[in-house]
Amino acid sequence: MYRAFTSRRAVQTDAKFLGDMLVEAANWRSGGLRPRHEVLASAEHRRYLAGWKRTADDGLVAIDADDVPIGAAWYRMLPQNEPGLGFVGIAVPELIIGVHPLWRARGVGRSLLRGVVELAGSQGHARISLSVERENFARNLYRAEGFSVVESTGSRETMVRVTV
């Protein structure tokens, strides 16, 4: 039986843990591990965390029964002149999600995804976007949770979901 988990709103002091989850998201392939400092220093990834928590940033952190963080999902509003991988428009936040490997396939990611979509909608965002590599198993979760592909470039897909 799986241990229970809950979630709470992400706060400014969660920045280090969000960094850990960003690294998990970047290293989704088994055996394809990029060091933490390399992921966080890359322009491709640092935009999703630098200066956390800005006014338009929001998200959730999943915690286990001992209040230990096990996963996170958050979104950022990124400018058109510095778009992220899942950029579709200036009024559409980009979603980032990561789950500790020991907690994958236990419903944590799905729970976080549903929660952050609901949170984005409650904050007035009509849509939320993300980018995922086609080979990433999380792609199936996103499709199952109502995300649709709006653009395919190379090995990546940009997906969008209506929040309301």
Image (cartoon, rainbow, N blue to C red):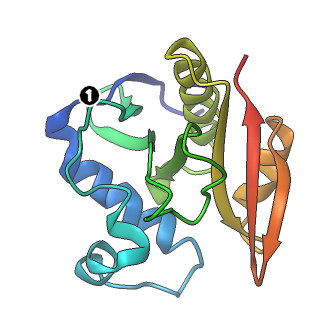
Task: Indicate the quadrant containing the C terminus: top left, top right, bottom left or bottom right.
Answer: top right
Picture coordinates of residue 116, whole percent (x, y): 54, 29
Task: Indicate the quadrant containing the N terminus: top left, top right, bottom left or bottom right.
Answer: top right
Residue visible at 75% across and 52% down in the picture: 159
Q: Residue 148 or 125: which is nearer the viewer?
A: 125
Picture coordinates of residue 128, whole percent (x, y): 64, 37
Residue visible at 82% across and 53% down in the picture: 140
Q: Residue 163 or 2: which is nearer the viewer?
A: 163
From the viewer's perspective, is residue 14 above or below residue 155?
above
Residue holding disc 1: 67
Q: Judge from the rendering whether residue 71 lies leftward or rightward of residue 156; answer left or right.
A: left
Q: Residue 126 or 112: which is nearer the viewer?
A: 126
Residue 136, by quadrant, is bottom right
Picture coordinates of residue 51, whole percent (x, y): 19, 50
Residue visible at 23% across and 38% down in the picture: 53
Q: How many marks?
A: 1
Q: Judge from the rendering whether residue 96 lies leftward or rightward of residue 86; answer left or right.
A: left
Residue 69, by quadrant, is top left
From the viewer's perspective, is residue 160 above or below residue 79?
above
Picture coordinates of residue 92, whole percent (x, y): 59, 39
Q: Residue furthest front?
A: 81
Give the residue type that dot 1 points to.
Asp
Residue visible at 51% across and 49% down in the picture: 97
Residue 144, by quadrant, is top right
Q: Judge from the rendering whether residue 118 lies leftward or rightward of residue 153; answer left or right.
A: left
